[in-house]
Amino acid sequence: MLVLSIVDIIGTVAFAVSGVLVGIRNKLDLFGVYVLAMITASGGGIIRDVVIGRNIPVFFTEWKYFAAITASMAVTCVLYKFVNRIISVIILFDAIGLGVFTVTATYRAIEYGLPLLGVVFAGVITGVGGGILRDILVNEIPLIFRSEIYAIPSIIGSVLFYLFYDNVNINVNTYICIAVVLSIRMISVKFGLNLPILSKSEHPGNDGESNRRNFRFKNNNL
C-alpha cells in the first residue's frame, strides 16, 4: 500500500529526529547521535517483525530506511539551533512516530493473520519500542513509564484500526487512527494527564513504629 509506505517513512523520520534531538540534548558526539537516531527509528519495527514471524526484519532489506534516517540526522543537526523549545519538538516528533508506527504495525500484524491480542501487542510494542530503547541508552527512565499518557493512545489506535479494518477504506482508516493516537498523546501532554501512580510514604504508627509504610495513589503532573 502506497499510503502505508509513505506514512511508514514519515514515522521513521519522526522517530529519527527525536533520537537526534535527544542525543544533542545529552551532548553525544556525531556517531552517538547517529546510533541513537538509528535505534530509535528502527527498534520498534525490528521487534515487530520478530513478533509477527518475519524471517528478516524489513529494516535490513530496504535501503530507504537507512537513507531516511541519515537524511533526518543531517538536516536536524544543521537546523537544531533554530529550534526554540527542543523538548517540545522531541515530544511532537515522538508522538508522530508513535501514531504512525502503531498503525503500520497493526496493519502488518493483521495481514500476517494474528488475532486481536497479537495485533495490539505488535502495534503497541512497535510504537513505543524505539522510544524505550532511546531513553535507556541515554540513561533516562523511558517516557512510557514516567510521562503523560503514552501507551494508552497506542492501544486505542491499534484497536480502532483493527475494528475498522473490514469496514473503512484502508487509507481513511490509517489517517483516522494516526490522528487519534497523535491527538490523545498531545492532549495528555498539554493538560498533564497521567494514570495514577502508586507512591510510598512513611508515617509514624500508633504502635511506635516510626517507619511503617503506607501507600497512596497520586497524580504526577509534569
Image: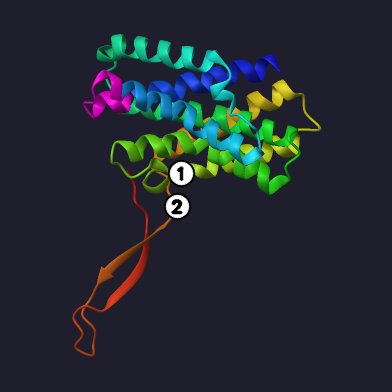
Inspect this view and state whether residue 130 appears: yes
Give the mark nearer the N terminus: 2 vs 1.
1
Residue drawn 25% across and 27% down?
25
**Is 40 rendered above or below residue 147?**
above
* Residue 63 pos. (x, y %): 53, 14
**Extreme right residue here?**
167
Left or right, 222 with respect to 125, comes to left
Inspect this view and state whether residue 89 appears: no
Q: Name the image colouring.
A: rainbow
Residue drawn 64% across and 27% down?
176
Q: Which of the 4 quarters of the picture holds residue 9?
A: top right
Residue in front for this viewpoint, 206 or 129: 129
Amino acid type, callout 1: Ile
Q: Which of the 4 quarters of the picture holds residue 107?
A: top right
Quadrant showing the C terminus: top left
Q: CA distance from mark 2 to mark 1?
A: 7 Å
Tell me whether circle 2 and circle 1 mark residues in contact (CB < 8 Å): yes
Amino acid type, callout 2: Leu
**Magenta-colored segment: predominant secondary structure:** helix
* Residue 169 pos. (x, y %): 77, 24
Q: Residue 22 magenta-drawn?
A: yes
Label annotation for residue 149? 1
Q: Residue 210 magenta-drawn?
A: no
Left or right, 45 with respect to 83, comes to right
Please provide the residue range marked out in magenta: 21-32
Residue behind mark 2: 195
**Secondary element at image label 1:** loop
**Secondary element at image label 2:** loop
Left or right, 206 with respect to 117, comes to left
Residue in front for this viewpoint, 91 or 129: 129
